[in-house]
Image (tube, helix red, strand yellow):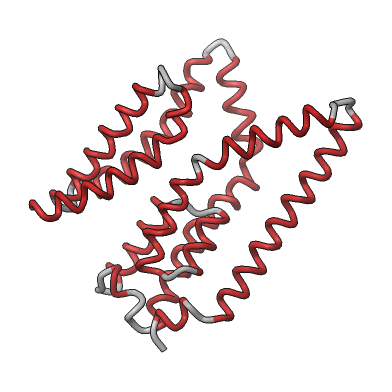
Amino acid sequence: MTGETLANSPLLFILIGAGLLAIVAFALFSYKKAKNRCLELGISQETISAVVKSTISAALVPSLAILLGFVILSVSLGVAWPWWRLSVIGSLAYETMAAQYTADGLGIEMSQILSSDATVFAAVMIVMTIGVIISPIMVAIVGEKYSTGVMNAKSGSKGEWGTIFSGLFYLAMFAVYIPIMVFSDLPTTLTLVTSMVVAIVVGALSKKLPILAEFTMAASLIIGMASSVLWAALF
């Protein structure tokens, strides 16, 4: 059995479909409970509807980046598994990195995952799942204490330290991802630079047209991917 056979197996689609239906059902249940509570508090139905409409519209544009991530991953991992990962808790950066590291550890290219033995695809699924599941477990254990601590740090007499402490997490993410891209090869580095420039330009333009801020990630991904073809051809 090849990885492609496993990735396209009806059982995998059924399990993923069942999981997504369970998540949708939970979301609808939460919405119903929240709506009833709002009505108990005297919030009008018109206000609730306005919040729902604005939330949906605000979520649609950023989801374009997720859709692009799905298209990218589906080339190497099929349709079902990226659909599940990016629909629930995954992100394009993590999923791609986890799959790439697994492929490197097995001595193959990421583009060969589907054509390799099914155990290779299974290994990719395990690594992607175990790696990302740590986050919700840690949130359940220390999330409340951490959130309360950061809020107290920001509101205390030394509030600037709370802000700095929060910013350190973003710096840690950059320290992990950026060197991988910069020191891999020249086309990858130039693609990273191109995406950064696009993000900066869109960010500057969004000051005059705020709605453009919602397209920052999508624009960076699309133009970055397009530029990667050019850089690969040149270098």
Of all residues, the one furthest to the left in this rendering is 235
- Given residues 111 and 59, the one toward you in this image is 59
Q: Position of residue 128 (x, y in %)?
A: 45, 63
Left or right: residue 34 versus residue 92 is right
Classify residue 15 as left or right of residue 34.
left
Question: x%, y% of residue 112?
Answer: 29, 74
Examine the image and state in which quarter residue 48 appears.
Answer: top right
Judged left or right of residue 182, residue 156 is right
Q: Nearer the viewer, residue 151 or 27?
A: 27
| Residue drawn at the location 88% of the way across and 32% of the way down | 39
Q: Is residue 190 above or below residue 14?
A: above
Is the residue 108 above or below the residue 151 in the image?
A: below
- Position of the N terminus, as image quadrant, is bottom left
- In the current view of this chain or complex, which residue is farthest to the bottom? 1
Residue furthest toward the top?
157
Which one is in front, 57 or 180?
57
Q: Which residue is rendered at x = 37% and y = 26% of the image?
A: 203
> Which quadrant of the structure image shows residue 153?
top right
Q: Residue at x 37, y 38 (%)?
A: 172
Of 174 and 229, the residue lying toward us: 229
Q: Residue 52 in the image: x percent, y percent?
A: 70, 36
Q: Quadrant of residue 218?
A: top left
Q: Is residue 146 above or below residue 118?
A: above
Instruction: Please tell me which residue is depicted at 87% across the width and 38% down the height of the picture.
Output: 36
- How many marks the image carries: the answer is 0
Q: Horizontal and vertical percent for residue 217?
A: 40, 39
